[in-house]
Amino acid sequence: MVGDWVFYEGTPSKMSMVNSNELPINIQPIPLSPEVIEKIEGIRKRVFNDGYIINGVTISFEDEDDGYWVCIKQIILKLQYLHQLQQLIRLFANKEIELKW
């Protein structure tokens, strides 16, 4: 999706256009990790739990071997990649995530 962060040739890049007939094969999703989460601009860590506030949306993360359980507005989902988190923030806050690489 346009605006999603991905690895392009090993470098974090923001998708600027999507044409399914011409997608480069060297695009990879960015796995969620504490290091990636901390790179989100404007993120605030909540003191009383392992949650964060991203663009006004409170999110709690629980680490798993193959992703994170995310609780957002009483909905619990399992996410593996940054672009999945971006799409949730777009849905609930109507805002984009920016990263500090």
Image: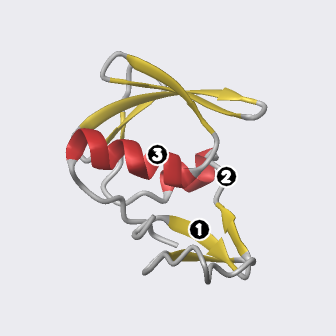
Q: Quadrant of residue 98?
A: bottom left
Quadrant (top left, top right, bottom left, bottom right) of the N terminus: bottom left
- The secondary structure type at the circle numbered 3 is helix
What amino acid is at disc 1? Val
Q: Quadrant of residue 89?
A: top left
Tell me: residue 3, above or below residue 90: below
Is the residue under label 1 in contact with that under label 2 (CB below 8 Å)? no
Q: Residue at x 42, y 52 (%)?
A: 86
- Measured as percent of width and height from the top left, residue 75 is found at 39, 19
**The furthest residue to the front:** 21
Which badge, 1 or 3, is on the more N-terminal residue? 1
For this rendering, which residue is in front, 101 or 97? 97
Is the residue under label 3 in contact with that under label 1 (CB below 8 Å)? no
Tell me: residue 95, above or below residue 78: below
- Measured as percent of width and height from the top left, residue 57 is found at 27, 36
Where residue 6 is drawn, which disc sits there? Answer: 1
Q: CA distance from mark 2 to mark 3?
A: 10 Å
Residue holding disc 2:
31
Which badge, 2 or 1, is on the more N-terminal residue? 1
**The furthest residue to the right:** 65
Q: CA distance from mark 2 to mark 1?
A: 9 Å
- Measured as percent of width and height from the top left, residue 58 is found at 31, 31
Which badge, 2 or 3, is on the more N-terminal residue? 2
Tell me: residue 45, above or below residue 55: above
Residue holding disc 3:
85
What amino acid is at disc 2? Pro
